Amino acid sequence: MAERTQKQKPTPARTEEAVESAPSPTAQGDKLKAELDDLLDEIDEVLETNAEDFVKSYVQKGGE
Amino acid sequence: MAIAKVCGIETEYGIQVRGAESNPVAASSVLINAYVSGVLRQVGWDFNDEQPGNDARGFSFEHFFAPEVESQLVNTVLTNGARYYVDHAHPEVSTPECVNALEVVRFDRAAEEIIRASMLAARRLLNDGSEIVTYKNNSDGKGNSYGCHENYLVDRSTPFARIVSQITPHFVSRQVFCGAGKVGSELAGTSSTAVPYQISQRADFFEEEVGLETTLKRPIVNTRDEPHCDAQKYRRLHVIVGDANMSEVATYLKVGTTAIVLAMIEDDQIGTDLTLANPVSAIRQISHDPSLTRTVLLRDGRRLTALELQWSLFERARTYERSHGLACVGESIASDLMARWEAVLTGLGTDRASVAHWVDWVAKARLIEGFADRHGLSADDARLKALDLQYHDMRAERCLANRMGLEVLISHDDVRTAMTEPPQTTRAYFRGTCLQRWPDQIVAANWDSMVFDIGREPLRRVPMMEPLRGTAEHVAALFDQCATAAELLARLGS
């Protein structure tokens, strides 16, 4: 494509990493958990304040 | 040989008004008008050629749908060749026609940014503290669904019955990498204990294997036969079975793998041995099983998991790539597409977390499980449903998908460009460029025609029956040579 010359490489990310640097499954799991913890800290800040009302009020008409 | 898989995607967004009373139709209109009034003069859509009641099985339901109902609603064509309109009670963007899956991702991302810009513009316009919020999802969690439809150009000479039977195993199983994930189930009689979380937003809503409906008794294969191009040569396969994706890679794989499977069907390279005994129950069984271990029954008596079905399709695609090549799905992306298809199946089968940056339902599951663990929540806690909805929130600062580390395929600049510039490689180039150059002289636009009013003559309709004509290669020089629409029409007519 003329408008898209950037080349993408497939990145089966962590399976490759695991082969190259061979971290133990536990270490890998801990890393993921730490990332998720950071994420959950952030998410607490942006979450809708009254989840129950929010979910209840989200009513859509069927489409298509 | 299979024809070029020209494709596109149309997404209905969920819509909610906060801080004011409003109905969704009015809110959708405000949203679109706020964008259009700030960006370009509205050009009407021409419904003369719309025949959504035509059925690919060869008969026609007259008055089955009534486009005139829609035509009273806001409906516009953008300079990037997309259509932005109110469909039922939702704002919807249809991408322009694209030549490959990566282009579809680029224009789907542009559509998201157009929706975001619309929300900001509407907020300024309303100026009363109220806010229109949109969601790129497919269900309200209460049994109401809205669609994300794909379209693919297929050869009219391919028997439709073959398409139906051979695409169905892909439509049932591809959700393992393009499902958007959902907390709970909307299937009558299924409790949140039985299905706390499922792979697809949409699987609960499919009740038929094949049919014309889109809003009730939804079929896995939709038979709408409205090609928007030369009907003697082409079909447009209208696919209603997919979820809207937040992950760019998921959209890329969804469209790219489907284009490959359709090409294989055209060249009769799939075979019939993957035919499912009951596709409707299979699509739900697969969706309701995030462990990916449940098997579904094939007509020949075998039982396969969704991943095994996908591996079978992938292996056949690999063989097809060697024998026929994959030029028809886009030479420039074919090897990347195949590599990612293989990698996502490998990841799903071995280390789920390794594809959390590609697969929406996996990313969302991590979020839901992590949050439930942290706060000790039960599966039916409203906060988990709120997280599910907020994963799809189109406000950049609220969108949870944005925080999940999903891989980005399209650069910020490329997305910005695609908001206003059409693709170079399909007839959308002609449509978009005409709208950029002569908006005041275009009275109507459609997928397969443009209608001009140049004053001194009757209205002039320019047909665009070939999706791959009117590209930059064909007409960029012509546009350069024409200062006015009248000159363009004179040149086209000569």
Image (spheres, helix red, strand yellow):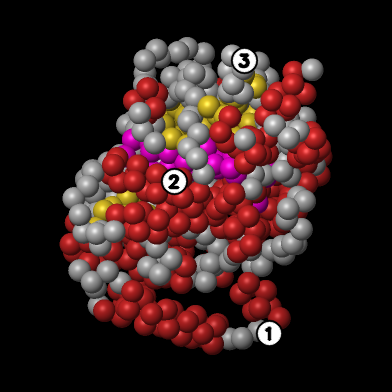
SS label for mark 3: loop
Q: Which mark is residue B457?
A: 3
Residue B256: image location, x then y, percent: 63, 47
How many numbered tags mark residues here?
3
* Kind of residue sitting beneath label 1: Ser
Q: Give the mark toward the camera: 3 or 2.
A: 3
Comparing B359 with B226, the one in front is B226
Q: Is residue B211 visible?
A: yes
Chain letter of disc 2 in the image:
B
Residue B196: image location, x then y, percent: 30, 60
SS label for mark 1: helix
Range drawn in magenta? B77-102
Q: CA distance from mark 1 to mark 2?
A: 55 Å
Image position of B241 (left or right of B78):
left
User: Mark 2 — residue?
Assistant: B37
Quarter-wise, where is residue B144 in the image? top left
Residue B345: image location, x then y, percent: 59, 58
Query: Above or below — where is B314 with respect to B348?
Result: above
User: Mark 1 — residue?
Assistant: A21
* Kind of residue sitting beneath label 3: Glu
Q: Give the mark toward the camera: 3 or 1.
A: 3
* Kind of residue sitting beneath label 2: Ser
Quarter-wise, where is residue B351 in the image? bottom right
Residue B179: image location, x then y, percent: 46, 53
Q: CA distance from mark 3 to mark 1?
A: 72 Å
Chain letter of disc 3 in the image:
B
